[in-house]
């Protein structure tokens, strides 16, 4: 029988979010036998949208489904995605600077992050913000990036962690980036909520170019940016089109977490050391391992990018930011140092010296509120808790009341 892929053995522990769900189930089971009437568990844990898709975008999804039921409007595989959708993405997010063949439609940004490592192979030097969304590290480990290289400090078997802490304003020391690295960078950041400034992104791009590195920029929360001075895309930095891929999605902006639609921008200007085109390789990979996003989802995506759709995105993200403000307020009243929330749906709260999983358990047991332990996002997340602002308003208010009384 075949051997197990050794990269699977290199993964540390289970994937974060199923582990949280497991601990929640365990807690529910433990109190079920206790006989004490218990309040409902509320989740401020996983970043999963809760509010209905707004009417204009939802009507387009409905029409997209109906179109499949008529001969004259039926469509099958749409491997590369609707050209009009790719044009609108370029226009709305990138000022029209990219042609449709530089925008690749996908079934969500996580899926593309998982596929992107194929571009760089197992020899890639990977840098990640610490803390960061676990898929950058786990996806790289699965692709073998951690297999062939010795740890050179602060890393995870060849993956270099760039600490982002209060001491450095949640922006990493870029001098740690080695020649020829693949740098995963997320802004507004999950989990810290920090949104990088224009100066910071310019510095990141300068360093990437100086070290002949590539940036994989995750802009999944760009639509939460409210500060008009903050960049919404890596391509606002000079020279980024030569060194940066950007992933984004409709998940957190339009509520498409279950619909599944995203995109990746891969500019023609990006070239490897040997001059080969990154765009051509990405087109080849996508043509080989991906069969296109759902036609229905793309109909919804088109609507999300017109005037009415953009208003709905603004309203939906405003709603979640309203939740974030409530959570921030109660934590600050409790004297817990925290950040994020203003340009992001996440609040990053410092419970030091209490360890993350201990704080997670204490909040679950006392308040019946599920959170996400910061240690799950990397070593620099230890002693932090991430609160997600995705939830119905009544639930968030109830959770905030409990945090205020019981924490
Ligand atoms: C739980 C920085 C959430 N099961 O929906 P997608 O694939 O377009 O977006 C996924 C994604 C991409 N980039 C960043 C993200 O934070 C997310 C979603 N993260 C969270 O709570 O951190 C949902 C996590 C989901 C998962 O594993 O992704």
Image (cartoon, helix red, strand yellow):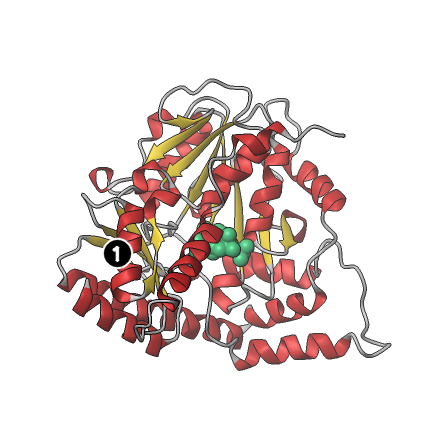
Q: Is residue 135 left or right of residue 321?
A: right
Identify whether 171 is placed above or below 72: above
Nearer to the camera, 41 or 28: 28
What residue is at 33 percent from the left and 79 percent from the top?
394
Judging from the image, what secondary structure is the residue with disc 1 in? helix
Q: Position of residue 402 (x, y in %)?
A: 23, 70
Nearer to the camera, 171 or 307: 171
Identify whether 395 is placed above or below 148: below
- For mark 1, what is the residue? 362
Q: Is residue 98 left or right of residue 370?
A: right
Which residue ends up furthest to the right in the rendered image? Answer: 71
Nearer to the camera, 198 or 150: 150
How packed mark 1 is, by other alpha carbons closer than 10 Å (few <14, some 14-19, many 20 or more), is some
Q: Position of residue 1 (x, y in %)?
A: 76, 30
What residue is at 32 percent from the left and 49 percent from the top?
192
What residue is at 27 percent from the left and 59 percent from the top?
363
Identify whether 260 is placed above or below 246: below
Q: Position of residue 123 (x, y in %)?
A: 57, 23
Q: Position of residue 59 (x, y in %)?
A: 61, 81
Work out which quarter of the rendered image holds the C terminus and state it: bottom left
Residue 197 visible in the displayed image: no
Picture quadrant where residue 175 is located? top left
Residue 404 visible in the displayed image: yes
Cβ of mark 1 under 8 A from ligand 1: no
Nearer to the camera, 236 or 118: 118
Picture quadrant where residue 169 is located? top left
What residue is at 54 percent from the left and 82 percent from the top?
55
């Amino acid at each position: 029988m075949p051997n197990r892929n050794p990269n699977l053995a290199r993964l540390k522990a289970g994937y974060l979010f199923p582990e949280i769900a497991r601990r929640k189930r365990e807690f529910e089971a433990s109190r079920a036998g206790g006989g004490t009437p218990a309040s409902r568990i509320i989740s401020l844990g996983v970043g999963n949208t809760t509010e209905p898709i707004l009417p204009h975008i939802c009507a387009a999804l409905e029409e997209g489904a109906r179109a499949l039921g008529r001969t004259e409007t039926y469509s099958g595989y749409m491997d590369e995605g609707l050209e009009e959708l790719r044009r609108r993405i370029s226009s709305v997010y990138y000022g029209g600077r990219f042609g449709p063949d530089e925008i690749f439609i996908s079934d969500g940004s996580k899926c593309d992050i998982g596929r992107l490592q194929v571009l760089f192979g197992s020899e890639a030097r990977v840098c990640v913000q610490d803390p960061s969304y676990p898929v950058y590290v786990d996806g790289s480990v699965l692709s073998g990036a951690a297999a062939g290289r010795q740890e050179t400090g602060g890393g995870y078997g060849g993956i270099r962690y760039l600490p982002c802490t209060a001491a450095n304003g949640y922006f990493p020391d870029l001098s740690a980036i080695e020649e020829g690295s693949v740098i995963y960078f997320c802004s507004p950041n999950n989990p810290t909520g920090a949104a990088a400034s224009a100066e910071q992104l310019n510095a990141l791009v300068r360093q990437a170019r100086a070290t002949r590195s590539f940036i994989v920029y995750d802009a999944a929360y760009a639509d939460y940016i409210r500060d008009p001075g903050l960049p919404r895309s890596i391509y606002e930095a000079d020279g980024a089109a030569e060194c940066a891929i950007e992933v984004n999605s409709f998940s957190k902006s339009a509520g498409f977490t279950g619909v599944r639609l995203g995109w990746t921008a891969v500019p023609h200007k990006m070239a490897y050391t040997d001059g080969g085109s990154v765009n051509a390789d990405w087109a080849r990979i996508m043509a080989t391992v991906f069969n296109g996003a759902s036609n229905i989802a793309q109909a919804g995506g088109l609507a999300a990018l017109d005037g009415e759709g953009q208003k709905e995105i603004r309203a939906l993200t405003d709603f979640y930011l309203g939740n974030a403000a409530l959570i921030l307020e109660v934590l600050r009243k409790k004297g817990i140092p925290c950040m994020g929330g203003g340009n992001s749906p996440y609040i990053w709260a410092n419970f030091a010296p209490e360890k993350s999983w201990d704080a997670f358990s204490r909040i679950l047991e006392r308040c019946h509120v599920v959170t996400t332990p910061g240690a799950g996002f990397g070593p620099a997340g230890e002693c932090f808790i991430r609160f997600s602002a995705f939830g119905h308003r009544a639930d968030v208010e109830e959770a905030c009341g409990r945090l205020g009384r019981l924490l």
